[in-house]
Image (cartoon, rainbow, N blue to C red):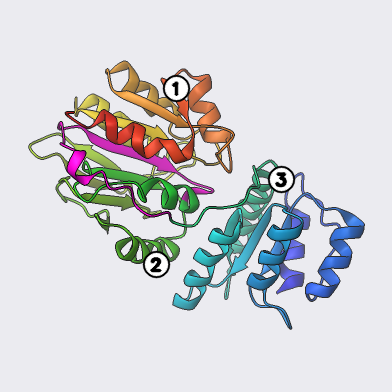
Amino acid sequence: MRALFSDILDQAKNVRVVGAAANAAEARDQIDALRPNVITLDVEMPGMSGIEFLEEIMEHNPLPVVMLSSLTQAGTETSLKAFELGAVECFPKPLRATPEQFNKSVGKLGKIVLAAANSNVRDRKTVRDQKQVDAQFEWNGRIVACSASMGGIDALTTLLSDFPSNCPPTIVALQAEPALVETFIKRLNTDLKCAVKAAKDGAALSQGTIHIAADPECHVVVEPGTPPRIRLIAREPIEGARPSANLLYGSIARGAVPAVGAVLTGMGSDGAKGLKLLRDAGCDTFAQDRKTALVAEAPTAAIELDAASREVALDELATTMIGCCNIG
């Protein structure tokens, strides 16, 4: 498997593999000698596990790390642990791959590694105690819409931990592996006071519920009404993204649904154009502060397009957005 991923990365544009290690001991020596920009780390290694070695790296010599993991139930739990420890991204190991799937992996993993090289590696926060804001929050009718891709699991863990049990109806467009998102939703339902669900076609946007849309085969939009409803649409990716944050935000703006929007960490520029439509429609719009965004490409695109009214640090974003939805 190590040789397979070395081959994949050797074929990727603007990526050069400078070394390969069979275990943690070899990896330590090569990291010191070669000083790589990014490390790809297999969860399953002989001796010290990939998770244990990741923890060591982030404690003593923080570097961008892309974890290679399976998408079994155990694998997705391990991936979430890797995000908590500081991994930039978790890439699924192809158990069986056709030539076409292999070629897609080449391009996707190459882009991830390049984005990781420019990421903001930092100590991650565990889910903090939820602030007791329930009694102070009185919903004013606005919905919350967010988007994220690379680094999104970690950012959403921090953001949503401050949402009250009676939070505004919330829709999130998240580009991540569906199996990982399924496990992530289960964990959020354990950790948070509000309900968290996978977005379903026709679901009503109601107070106290967060809907996460991550199906790579469908876009998500909001249909105006009382209450507004989620619609899932099977159509081609838009500028390489599906679900497209641009399409989500655009549907809210065109439907004149009162809303607050925010573009979080992620690769590329998806979300910027749609967020601009939201802002032009009179909605409050924000971008995650580029200093706290693990991958700042998406927030940067929103800021440069003047789509966000301002940048907000991740640990202040929930309070800011909830405040926009509060009558008080």
Q: Residue at x 26, y 25 (%)?
A: 253
Residue 161: in magenta span: no
The residue sitting at the right extreme is: 33
Amino acid tagged 2: Thr
Report the mark closest to the observer, 1 or 2: 1
Instruction: Give the alpha-carbon distance from disc 1 to disc 2, as whole Å.
Output: 32 Å
Amino acid tagged 1: Arg
Locate residue 37, reporting x and y percent.
78, 49
Residue 149: in magenta span: yes
Q: Which residue is mark 2?
A: 183
Instruction: Give the alpha-carbon distance from disc 1 to disc 3, as whole Å.
Output: 26 Å
Q: Residue at x 44, y 56 (%)?
A: 127
Q: Which residue is mark 3?
A: 117
Q: Nearer the viewer, residue 74 or 135?
A: 135
- Checking the image for residue 310, the label placed there is 1
To which quarter of the image does residue 268 belong? Answer: top right
> Upstream in the sequence, badge 2 or badge 3?
3
User: Is 142 positioned to the left or the right of 49 in the image?
Assistant: left
12 in relation to 144, above or below? below
Locate residue 60, reporting x and y percent.
75, 59
Q: Give the extent of the magenta segment.
A: 128-152
Amino acid tagged 3: Ala
Q: Residue at x 82, y 70 (%)?
A: 21
Q: Nearer the viewer, residue 190 or 17?
A: 190
User: Mark 2 near mark 3, Cβ–Cβ under 8 Å?
Assistant: no
User: Mark 1 near mark 2, Cβ–Cβ under 8 Å?
Assistant: no
Q: Residue at x 49, y 52 (%)?
A: 154
User: Is 226 positioned to the left or the right of 276 in the image?
Assistant: left
The residue sitting at the bottom extreme is: 47
Mark 2 surroundings within 10 Å by alpha-carbon count, few (fewer than 14), some (14 through 19), many (20 or more): some
Question: In what quadrant of the picture does the N terminus appear?
Answer: bottom right
